[in-house]
Image (cartoon, grey):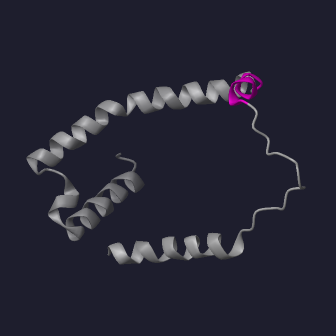
């Protein structure tokens, strides 16, 4: 199953190597090497609110990761029981969601 995921990755790397070209720079002209901190200060309040909200959501999911590790340690995760059990659990959750019970 892993090899199915490798095919698009290899295709994209080949596309990057073959299809993407760096634009030519005028001779004697240097690349823009400005420091990023002044540019960060120019970003608006909306951007920083989105960043803060994303950080809060990331922290909120941090404890969930420990729960998943504990379930994996105890052998209670569905993915350890095989693809059929994972499919059955997904279909069950889908049926409950369609019925409005979840």
Choose between 24 and 83: the one closer to the eye: 24
Residue 21 x %, y %? 75, 68
* Residue 55 on the magenta segment: no
Q: Is residue 78 left or right of residue 30?
A: left
To which quarter of the image does residue 15 belong? Answer: bottom right
What is the chief secondary structure element of the magenta stretch? helix
Q: Residue at x 37, y 58 (%)?
A: 94
Residue 45 x %, y %? 72, 22
To which quarter of the image does residue 32 belong? Answer: top right
Choose between 27 and 96: the one closer to the eye: 27
Is residue 99 positioned above or below 68 on the image?
A: below
Choose between 36 and 84: the one closer to the eye: 36
Residue 33 x %, y %? 75, 37
- Quadrant for the C terminus in the image: top left
Choose between 63 and 2: the one closer to the eye: 2
Q: Which residue is drawn at 70% across and 27% down?
A: 40
Q: Is residue 65 left or right of residue 55?
A: left
Q: How many labels does the image show?
A: 0
Is residue 14 positioned above or below 61 on the image?
A: below
Q: Which residue is drawn at 19% across and 52% down?
A: 77
To which quarter of the image does residue 81 belong? Answer: bottom left
Is residue 74 positioned above or below 94 on the image?
A: above
* Residue 40 on the magenta segment: yes
Q: Residue at x 87, y 48 (%)?
A: 29
Query: Outermost residue toward the left?
Result: 74
Is residue 39 positioned above or below 75 on the image?
A: above
Q: Is residue 59 left or right of residue 68?
A: right
- Quadrant for the N terminus in the image: bottom left
Segment tinted magenta in the rendering? 35-42
């Amino acid at each position: 199953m892993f090899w199915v995921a490798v095919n698009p990755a290899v295709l994209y790397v080949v596309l990057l190597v073959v299809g993407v070209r760096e634009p030519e720079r005028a001779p004697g002209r240097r690349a823009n090497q400005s420091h990023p901190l002044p540019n960060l200060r120019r970003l608006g309040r909306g951007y920083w609110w989105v960043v803060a909200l994303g950080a809060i959501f990331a922290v909120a999911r941090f404890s969930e990761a420990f729960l998943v590790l504990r379930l994996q340690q105890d052998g209670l995760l569905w993915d350890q029981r095989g693809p059929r059990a994972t499919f059955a659990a997904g279909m069950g959750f889908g049926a409950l969601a369609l019925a409005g019970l979840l």
